Amino acid sequence: MTTQHPVSMRPQLHGLGVYAPGMPIEEVARRYGISRIIKLASNENPRGCSTRATEAVVREMQRASLYPEALGPELRAKIAAREQLSEEQVLIGNGSDELIRLLTRAYIEPGDEVVMADITFPRYPTNVRIEGGTVRTVPLKNGVHNLAAMLECMGSRTKMVFVCNPNNPTGTVVDHHQLLEFIQAVPENIMLVLDEAYIEYVTEEVLESARLLQNHPNLVILRTFSKIYGLAGLRIGYGLMHPDIAGALVRVKDAFNTSRVAQVAAFAALDDQAFVQACRLENAQERERVSRILLDKGWDVYPSQANFVMAKVQEDGMKWFQALLSKGIVIRAGQQLEADPQTLRITIGTPEENDFLLESINSLYQDGTFQLS
Ligand SMILES: *Cc1c(COP(=O)(O)O)cnc(C)c1O
């Protein structure tokens, strides 16, 4: 198809990249005929989800013929109570991905500028560009958001700023004192979106960001049930924000943006904090172990507080991606994340999965050099 379609697409969509997800297990199985496949590509929870969530989903199927409640009021109230906020300060989304889209849809116009790190989560720039906004990136400093430089980058046309903490794909966190100062310094007419998709994995001291909503009406906090809660396949997340912002997002959202099963699964998952705690603990131990072993190999590993690590390697990351894929392990190479091509992002798996990963990496080294068969 070389001719242009007679109906023209919006110009903002030209040159936009399409999100490349981690390769699904089913696709690897088909392509390589391998039965044991370990997916360490999308930062999913290797322990799955709480059995309480599973049971809630099965029960809810009796009501599958009925539309869900549009704002998920029971889940909303539960989150509000946990965060000591009013229900109007909570909005449930079809994953926090949807909330990112709703924020740009409701607030970004052509000419508006949005400040974010280079590199960070690619859904931010994509959604800004779809609305005709301009992306202004500020390089990370040693893999960490450079908040001072981000502040300097803000000008009269700046409408929004994204801070991903811990940052995807580097896994790094910003110092909590510096983050507080930054939140206090961002002008009130600029929306500050703090994406905390991995916050439950952080073992260092964290800023209690929800407490700041009271005095910072421009602050929006995004969380998700896709990561530590293990519900990525059900698509559900939430945002904490000023009621006026929630009101604006409701205007642009689909009527039934989250399903019944997702709502009850998230509700039940919140009740199983023992599961969350166990996942956090195991992840922290394994993150430490995997990081140390990779560092010992001479890989440059960013200090991660998330459930993945990013490492700089000597070779083209795609070679490692291919080599590990042929052994049944799916990771992400920098090129697939629009990051430094000599980097790899690897999700922390179960101890057994990590053992297999580390053995596979070892087997690809011979006499200390990387050998591709
Ligand atoms: C995974 C992720 C999300 C959200 O995922 P959803 O599945 O849409 O909730 C948001 N931000 C970052 C940085 C992520 O890595």
Image (cartoon, rainbow, N blue to C red):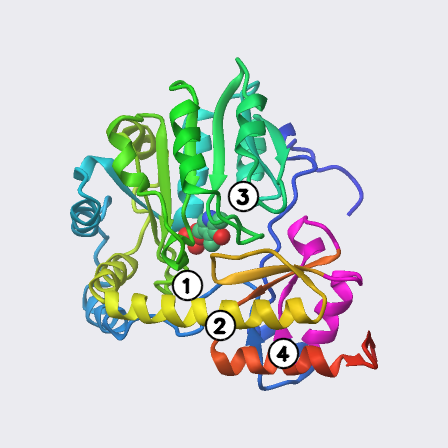
Q: Can you identify the residue that label 2 sits on?
A: 286
Disc 3 residue crowd, few under 14, some 14–19, many 20+, Cα 10 Å: some
Q: Amino acid at mark 2?
A: Glu
Disc 4 or disc 3, which is closer to the eye? Answer: 4
Of label 2 and label 1, which has the lower sequence position? 1
Disc 1 residue crowd, few under 14, some 14–19, many 20+, Cα 10 Å: few
Q: Could you give the CA–CA distance between mark 2 and mark 1, rounded to whole angstroms?
A: 24 Å
Instruction: Write the start and end of the magenta stretch as one range.
Output: 313-341
Q: Amino acid at mark 1?
A: Gly
Disc 3 CB within 8 Å of nearest ligand 1 atom: yes
Q: Secondary structure at mark 4?
A: helix
Q: Is residue 10 magenta?
A: no
Label annotation for residue 358: 4
Of label 1 and label 4, which has the lower sequence position? 1
Residue drawn 27% across and 26% down? Answer: 215
Q: Nearer the viewer, residue 111 or 303?
A: 303
Q: Could you give the CA–CA distance between mark 3 and mark 1, rounded to whole angstroms?
A: 18 Å
Q: Could you give the CA–CA distance between mark 4 and mark 2, rounded to whole angstroms?
A: 12 Å
Q: Could you give the CA–CA distance between mark 1 and mark 4, rounded to whole angstroms?
A: 27 Å
Q: Secondary structure at mark 3?
A: helix
Q: Nearer the viewer, residue 86 or 348?
A: 348
Q: Are marks 2 and 1 in contact (CB under 8 Å)?
A: no
Q: Can you identify the residue that label 3 sits on?
A: 123
Of label 3 and label 2, which has the lower sequence position? 3
Q: Are marks 3 and 2 in contact (CB under 8 Å)?
A: no
Q: Can you identify the residue that label 1 sits on?
A: 233
